[in-house]
Image (cartoon, rainbow, N blue to C red):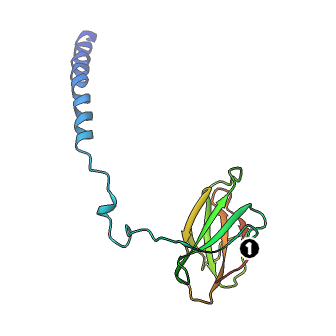
Amino acid sequence: MIRPLRQRHRRLFAVLVVALPVAFVGGIAARRPVPTSALFPGSISGEPRRFTAIQWSRGDLFTKAPIRVTLIREQAGSGRFAVELSATKDFAKPDLLVYWIAGGSTVSNAIPENAVLLAGFNESIRLPLPTVGPAANGMLILYSLADHEVVDVSKPISF
């Protein structure tokens, strides 16, 4: 009774030794290609904007975080705005997100409903701001996704 089971298992493992590598190589060969930017719609993969004109640079917008904020524009006197945030290497907060809130809203421990997510934060990042009018103002919010808390809120930014 044991001998037939051992023979069956031996044959089965001999088949698996050949079949599994062949199936693995076939699976790797049949994978779909990784999408490239040419496959995305134009609105997503559009050419990155060039922000060249520096309006101002300040290190005192955030009171709790040592972050320098530079307001830049596409061209001197016209075009969209962007902010460039840079921090020292020792500034470490887990999963830090940057939000923009237009107007003079107050921020407590939660992100307001009208806040716009700009991007995740790393040591130095350039973020285009949502389209705003010439007299619009707003604030930047740093939110730690890991801690579920507002890390810091900037002073109001006027254009």
- Determine if residue 139 is in view: yes
In the image: residue 121, left or right of residue 154? left
Please give the name of the residue rendered at 65% of the width and 61% of the height, measured from the top-left corner: 86
Residue receiving disc 1: 108
- Determine if residue 120 is in view: no
What is the x, y in percent for residue 53? 56, 74
Please give the name of the residue rendered at 60% of the width and 56% of the height, measured from the top-left corner: 122
Amino acid type, label 1? Ser
Outermost residue to the top: 3
Few, some or many C-alpha atoms within 10 Å of disc 1 (few <14, some 14-19, many ≥20)? few
In the image: residue 55, left or right of residue 106? left
**In the rendered image, the vertical position of residue 23 relative to residue 53, given as above or below:** above
- Number of disc labels: 1
Question: In the figure, residue 63 lies in which quadrant?
Answer: bottom right
**In the rendered image, the vertical position of residue 137 relative to residue 34, given as above or below:** below
The front one of 107 and 121 is 121
**In the rendered image, the vertical position of residue 114 relative to residue 148, given as above or below:** below
Which image quarter holds the N terminus?
A: top left
Question: In the figure, residue 46 lies in which quadrant?
Answer: bottom left
What is the x, y in percent for residue 50? 48, 70
What is the x, y in percent for residue 74? 51, 76
Please give the name of the residue rendered at 73% of the width and 71% of the height, measured from the top-left corner: 61
Q: Secondary structure at mark 1?
A: loop
Please give the name of the residue rendered at 74% of the width and 73% of the height, measured from the top-left corner: 108
Which image quarter holds the C terminus?
A: bottom right
What is the x, y in percent for residue 128? 53, 72
